[in-house]
Amino acid sequence: MDFSLIETIALYAVPVVFAITLHEASHGYVARIFGDHTAYMLGRVTLNPLKHIDPVGTVIVPLALLLLSKLAGGGGFLFGWAKPVPVNFGNLNHPKRDMLWVAAAGPAANFAMAFFWMLIYRLSAPDGALASDGMLLMSRAGVLVNVVLMVLNLLPIPPLDGGRIAISLLPHSLAAGYARLEPYGFMIILVLLASNVLDRLMSPMISLVLRLLQVLAGF
């Protein structure tokens, strides 16, 4: 079934909004558990997507990449970001150790959502209890969006979640030096994206996670 650009955007809208909202809210929620109330006081521990959407990173960049992908006949890598949830790591009960759990909360939320969408995909298949072409395609988008967001954020590049996890796990002497990469992290990601290295790095990991989800969902 061939969908137009507008139909494709409509199918991706709900999964994308849920993916970014729960990802960011999870960071703030776990930070609050471990002692930092910054995100909570700023109203970022919420399921209101308007609190998390970045007009450029959440809307303009993904739409532009989706349009380019459609013009190129499909394929390509969708990339975007939300407004980061503010976390004052110094307020955490054990800053270096607790940083790991705060950082891991976002990717964990995406994995849970990907599993949820995988179950919906199974139910909305032609032989499923809720057979629906539209829901089948939306759930497929939900799985892909959440898996890509999870894998991207787990790359060990500060300030991505994987970078913060690496800083938490490294010895203090190495962690301090590694943390200095953070101001250049976004530029590193853009270079990897433009050179197609990011796609080649992520594709095997995305395939592995998709296979795991299929097994867990009973495919």
Image: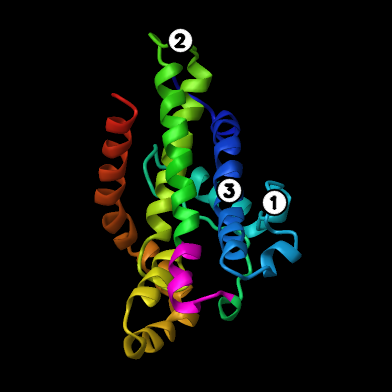
Q: Are marks 3 and 1 in contact (CB under 8 Å)?
A: no
Q: Earlier in the sequence, mark 2 or mark 1?
A: 1
Q: Residues within 10 Å of mark 1 (few under 14, many from 20)?
A: some
Where does label 2 land, which residue? Answer: 129
- Numbered range of the magenta stretch: 92-103
Query: Nearest the camera: 168 or 181?
Result: 168
Residue 6's x, y, as percent? 60, 32
Within 10 Å of disc 3 (Cα), the crowding (few <14, some 14-19, many 20+) is: many
Can I make out residue 185 in this image? yes
**Residue sitting at 47 percent across and 47 percent down?**
110
Residue at 27% from the left image edge and 58% from the top image edge:
201
Of the numbered discs 2 and 3, the one sitting upstream in the chain is: 3
Q: Against 115, is 34 above or below?
A: below
Q: Amino acid at mark 3?
A: Leu
Q: Secondary structure at mark 2?
A: loop
147 drawn magenta:
no
- The amino acid beneath tag 1 is Thr
Secondary structure type for disc 3: helix
Task: Tell me which secondary structure the magenta stretch mostly adopts.
Answer: helix
Q: Quadrant of the N terminus?
A: top left
Up the image or down, 169 lies above or below 11; here it is below
* Left or right placement of residue 207 versus residue 64 in this view: left
- On the picture, is 174 further left or further right than 97? left
Question: Residue visible at 61% across and 77% down?
Answer: 91
Where does label 3 land, which residue?
22
Q: On the image, numbered disc 1 is attached to which residue? A: 46
Residue 101 falls inside the magenta stretch: yes
Give the SS element for disc 1: loop
